């Protein structure tokens, strides 16, 4: 599972574990795979959320990712449209960060 937590931009050093950071959602490996086209668009903009590595998005990057997700339309980002679609979960994760005006940090467990 790739778990996402809110983290303030003014926290300079990434923590080794989430500790008391607010949990906002997670993606399974299958969910992450199904969002493959979305990850490719993020990579073009030097944003990455790999599954097996911890990663971080600053608040502005989370806002950009949400804008890109919303601009793609339903079905545009799913590698398999007939399969379970994790777009709603990713949208919730990104909206949580944007609404809190914070960034995201992910940890794979």
Image: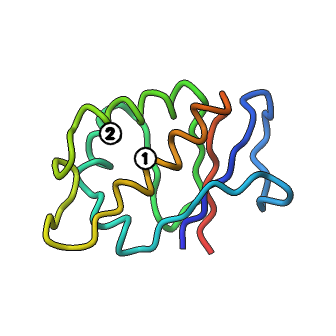
Image quarter in which the N terminus is found: bottom right
Q: Is residue 105 above or below residue 27?
A: above
Image quarter in which the C terminus is found: bottom right
Give the residue displayed 43% in from the left and 38% down from the top: 47
The residue nearer to you, when weighing 78 against 29, is 78
Residue picked out by circle 1:
91
Please count the marks in the image. 2
Q: Is residue 68 above or below residue 1?
A: above
Could you give the CA–CA distance between mark 2 and mark 1, rounded to whole angstroms?
A: 7 Å
Find the residue positioned furthest to the top: 60
Give the residue displayed 53% in from the left and 49% down from the top: 93
105 left or right, relative to 26? right
Residue picked out by circle 2:
69
- 2 and 1 marks in contact (CB < 8 Å): yes
Give the residue displayed 27% in from the left and 57% down from the top: 36
Question: At which x and y percent is residue 108?
Answer: 59, 68
Give the residue displayed 34% in from the left and 54% down from the top: 87
CA neighbours of label 2 inside 10 A, class few (<14), some (14 to 19), many (20+): many
């Amino acid at each position: 599972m790739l778990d996402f937590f809110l983290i303030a931009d003014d926290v300079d050093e990434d923590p080794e574990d989430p500790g008391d950071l607010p949990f906002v959602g997670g993606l399974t490996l299958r969910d992450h795979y199904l969002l493959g086209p979305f990850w490719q668009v993020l990579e073009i903009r030097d944003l990455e959320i790999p599954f097996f590595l911890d990663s971080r998005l600053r608040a502005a990057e989370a806002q950009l990712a949400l804008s890109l997700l919303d601009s793609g339309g339903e079905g545009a980002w799913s590698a398999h449209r007939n399969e379970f679609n994790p777009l709603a979960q990713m949208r919730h994760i990104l909206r949580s960060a944007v609404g809190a005006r914070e960034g995201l940090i992910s940890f794979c467990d």
